Amino acid sequence: MSFIGSIENVGLYALLMRRVLSVPDRMREFMKEFIKGVYQLGVNSIWIVVIISFFIGAVIVMQIALNVDSPMLPRFTVGVVSREIILLEFSSTIMCLILSGKVGSNVASEIGTMRITGQVDVLDIMGVNSANYLILPKVAAFVAFMPVLVIFSMFMGLFGGYVICLVLGTPSVETYIYGIQAFFRESFVWYSITKSMLFGFIIASVAGFFGYTVKGGALDVGKASTDSVVINSILILVTDLVFTQLAMG
Amino acid sequence: MEFEGDNVLNDINARFDKGLVNMIIGKSGSGKTVLMKCIVGLLTPTSGEIMYDGHNFLALKTKELRRLRRDIGMLFQGSALFDSRTVLENVMFPLDMFSRKNSRERRKRAEFCLERVGLSDAANLYPSEISGGMMKRAAIARAISLNPKYLFCDEPNSGLDPKTSQLIDELIEDITKDFMMTTIVVSHDMNSVINIGDKVVFINEGVKEWEGTKSEVMDADNEKLNDFVFASDLFKKIKEAEDKISEDKKG
């Protein structure tokens, strides 16, 4: 992707978003697609969120327990640090990076296939705002469902840590539970949820853009799908940096 | 009409009449699909006018354009049915989006359209579960569900066997006459032209070469049209037989 091409894509993305973020032609049809989107992008992602969060949570606790082993630090520090990592970065940023692969490629390939098989043209000829009809329900559904995924991720991450404490016994389960409750700031949960909703918008809209603007055949749909994952990952990391500085700096 | 500096269509002037099957024919790559895409607004020509009953399509405001679009039905080469919807849901889609009828009436209308194209039995099947010919019929049913004034068909017979092609042709012709639509069919299939083409426009290398009726096609003295029409052995033999009969009559 050349520099000029990238600049051009930013402009095209902005123009597409203008069409996407308008009032739907028929609210009834929008709601149908919204519910489909919640199931397809959100509910179907729960299992991957649960599995990854459980194991990463367990590994985080294990690593911290092994590496933060100092008489200067109380043992419940393992719980405190694990909780902050899971709440602040893992459940929002890292989980969204993973979801950008699953959800991003799903959205880009679905809309891309519709584009190359003429289904998008059919909508345009009918007078339907195709960008709005195809992309907005997916963006809205994913953004709306994101807090659920983040909460699942947080819970499973902490639960993974609990299980590892139960199995290894270091730190003890009681110490771990005390640690994850100590110095708890509720605002961190809201910060994480807000950030993930922003990432959710980026993932679904950028993937929608790449799918909607596909030209060519099946190979190009595959390329658009890959491009959407790459660009989404970069955007998530950059946005994370900016958002963290703005919200916590 | 230009693509990256190349002139694809040049100085095309044609009129398509109501209640007739108007055919745009030409070789592959001659520009006929581009012409159709310009007419339905999927591509914007660099100059010229596209008139729908006296209204310049290119000058219409968004609201007027949307209203006009509801009068347009289109059958795509690959049918372009929505994969995630059943045949009935595909036909109901335009009604769900634009009709003010209640749910029962919309369903009744969709079932009527499916019955009209002989697909009532396939209503609950998905596009991946039906044949190419059935897909075309389902796409026709969807195209006519809002009772459009204009029906556009892009290569309706591509990928179909001769018998199914004939069925699709007859269906297009019947629907055109029944609903008094202005139908425009893009094709390179001369069988279709002879079967249903009331009016024929021949495009060659982006230029309109010839215009006439289907009965005039066989006797036209346009060299490029003759090259196109008689590229098929069957049509060559028909022409030779006709010539022989007329010579015998003279003799």
Image (spheres, coloured by chain):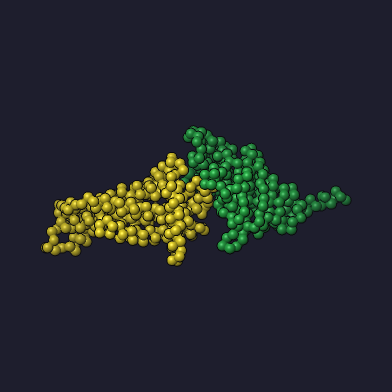
Chain colours: A yellow, B green
Does any portion of residue A14 appear in the rendered image? yes
Quadrant the C terminus of chain A occupies: bottom left
Percent from the top left, x then y, of residue A115? 50, 53
Does any portion of residue A102 appear in the rendered image? no
Q: Residue at x 63, y 43 (%)?
A: B53
Percent from the top left, x then y, of residue A193? 29, 51
Percent from the top left, x then y, of residue B36? 60, 51
Quadrant the N terminus of chain A occupies: bottom left
In the picture, measured across the screen, residue A84 lies left or right of residue A44, that is: left
Q: Residue at x 44, y 50 (%)?
A: A20
In the picture, measured across the screen, residue A225 lies left or right of residue B108, that is: left
> Residue most toward the left?
A71
Q: In this orientation, which residue lies closer to the viewer: B90 or A55?
A: B90
Q: In this orientation, which residue lies closer to the viewer: A120 or B130?
A: A120
> Residue most toward the bottom?
A2
In the picture, measured across the screen, residue B36 lies left or right of residue A167, that is: right
Q: Is residue B108 above or below residue A135?
A: above
Percent from the top left, x then y, of residue A204? 39, 53
Q: In this orientation, which residue lies closer to the viewer: B177 or B133?
A: B177
Q: Residue at x 43, y 45 (%)?
A: A23
